[in-house]
């Protein structure tokens, strides 16, 4: 093997000879690859004999292969493109290189899969990387827990207000019916997202704790994205 752009004399490749004269080839090491060199040996009577010599010119540096991630987690039936995770694939001499991808995976089946990426330059050097694909089942949202109120909490009074009397007859008048108040609109106070590291149980627990601390009626609602995947909990105050 000869390095790229290395200076080498054709006579240095001959171990021994009994020929009177040798016609040497020109050696070009400016590009990598296999080079065929033709030597012609000339005898005393002028007879000639050809000899073929092969050398391999190689680049001094191996190719570069980088991935955007070494581990990817998706849910069952979620789209996945293995080639989209290639960040860089090149060599100093060849430029951009084609990436071969090996390994089988099934996005319809939960499990852990290994995908192998490899590049090879014209000098025969290779670079290899692996990506671990984790396919997970979609988690079902847990049932909401109703907040527990203290047993000694004050209960609304059931006593009826005193009835008004008719000043002319002295008979009791029926109390005037009060117009029912419309419920106040709910207000979204806070959210706990799984993308921030929360789990189903921790997000729900924090939502209930914040709702109980507010002293108002509240509700913890499950958040979903457009694909129907659960993303967290939202606290709504009434």
Image: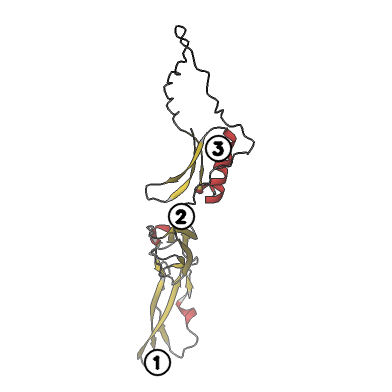
x and y, in percent, of residue 162 in the image: 53, 18
Residue drawn where x is 40% and y is 61% of the image: 82
Q: Is residue 171 visible?
A: yes
| Mark 2 or 1, nearer chain start | 1
Residue 90 badge = none
x and y, in percent, of residue 152 in the image: 64, 36
Residue 44 badge = 1
What SS does tag 3 mark?
A: helix
Q: CA distance from mark 1 to mark 3?
A: 106 Å
Label 1, residues with CA under 10 Å away: few <14, some 14-19, many ≥20: few
- Looking at this view, name the residue that lies furthest to the left: 47
Q: Answer whether labels 2 and 1 touch (C-beta < 8 Å).
A: no
Give the residue at mark 2: 140
x and y, in percent, of residue 228 in the image: 39, 50
| Mark 1 or 3, nearer chain start | 1
- In this picture the colour scheme is secondary structure
Closer to the camera in the image, 166 or 228: 166
Label 2, residues with CA under 10 Å away: few <14, some 14-19, many ≥20: few
Closer to the camera in the image, 122 or 233: 233
Give the residue at mark 3: 211
Residue drawn where x is 45% and y is 77% of the image: 10
Q: Is residue 83 above or below residue 3?
A: above
Q: Is residue 87 visible?
A: no
x and y, in percent, of residue 60 in the image: 50, 67
Q: CA distance from mark 3 to mark 2?
A: 23 Å
Q: Nearer the viewer, mark 1 or mark 3?
A: 3
């Amino acid at each position: 093997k000869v390095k790229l752009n290395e200076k080498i004399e054709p006579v240095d490749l001959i171990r021994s000879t009994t020929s009177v004269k040798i016609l040497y080839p020109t050696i070009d090491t400016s590009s990598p690859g296999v080079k065929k060199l033709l030597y012609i040996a000339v005898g005393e009577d002028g007879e000639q004999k050809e000899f073929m010599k092969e050398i391999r010119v190689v680049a001094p540096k191996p190719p570069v292969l980088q991935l955007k991630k070494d581990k990817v987690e998706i849910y069952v039936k979620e789209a996945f493109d293995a080639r989209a995770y290639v960040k860089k694939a090149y060599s100093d001499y060849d430029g951009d290189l084609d990436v071969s991808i090996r390994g089988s995976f099934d996005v319809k089946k939960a499990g852990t899969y290994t995908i192998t990426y490899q590049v090879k330059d014209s000098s025969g050097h290779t670079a290899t990387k692996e990506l671990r694909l984790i396919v997970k089942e979609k988690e079902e949202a847990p049932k909401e827990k109703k907040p527990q109120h203290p047993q000694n909490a004050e209960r609304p009074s059931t006593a009826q207000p005193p009835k008004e009397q008719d000043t002319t007859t002295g008979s009791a008048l029926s109390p005037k019916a009060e117009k029912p108040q419309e419920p106040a609109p709910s207000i979204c106070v806070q959210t706990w997202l799984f993308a921030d590291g929360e789990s189903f149980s921790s997000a729900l627990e924090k939502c209930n704790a914040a709702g109980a601390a507010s002293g108002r009626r509240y509700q913890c609602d499950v958040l979903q994205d457009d694909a129907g995947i659960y993303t967290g909990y939202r606290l709504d105050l009434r």
